[in-house]
Amino acid sequence: MKRKTAKKKETIKILGKDYKVDETIANTIKSLADALHSHEVALLTWVHKSYKKRKTKEKTQFEEALNAYVLRIPEAEKILKNMKEHDEGLKK
């Protein structure tokens, strides 16, 4: 007779609440969270390096909308401020 092994459960936190889920589900959620974080970093870098340096008349409607979207990322203003301070520190 074959014994069934218990599935390994991991605790993950979603919006401050703990959930016990299968290991594969936890790994999938972690992969998606990492991909989302990379996407956010890329968007914030675009705003920091490209958008902020353009003059107002050069900005297209799409760029204005994309900038507004990017600023909805949690703590976006703080992150952009840190990027600017870091760049200024490298110039010295």
Image (tube, grey):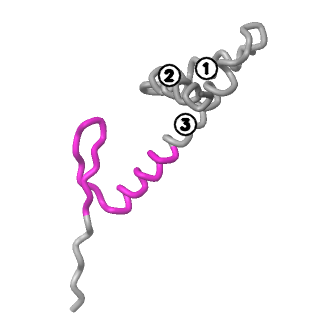
Disc 3 crowd, CA 10 A, few/some/many (<14, 14-19, 20+): some
Query: In screen coordinates, is 53 left or right of 74?
Result: right
The stretch of residues the image draws in magenta is 9-35
**Of marks 1 and 3, the one in the foreground:** 3
Q: Are marks 1 and 2 in contact (CB under 8 Å)?
A: no
State the residue position of label 3: 41
Number of numbered discs present?
3
Query: Of label 1 and label 2, which has the lower sequence position?
Result: 1
Identified by mark 3, the residue type is Val
Q: Nearer the viewer, residue 28 or 40?
A: 40
Indicate the position of residue 12 as horizontal and vertical percent values.
28, 49
**Of marks 1 and 2, the one in the foreground:** 2
State the residue position of label 2: 81
Identified by mark 1, the residue type is Asn
Does dot 3 land on a helix, a strand or a loop?
Answer: helix
Indicate the position of residue 41 as horizontal and vertical percent values.
54, 36
The residue under the point 63% across, 22% down is 66
Query: In screen coordinates, is 59 left or right of 38?
Result: right
State the residue position of label 1: 67
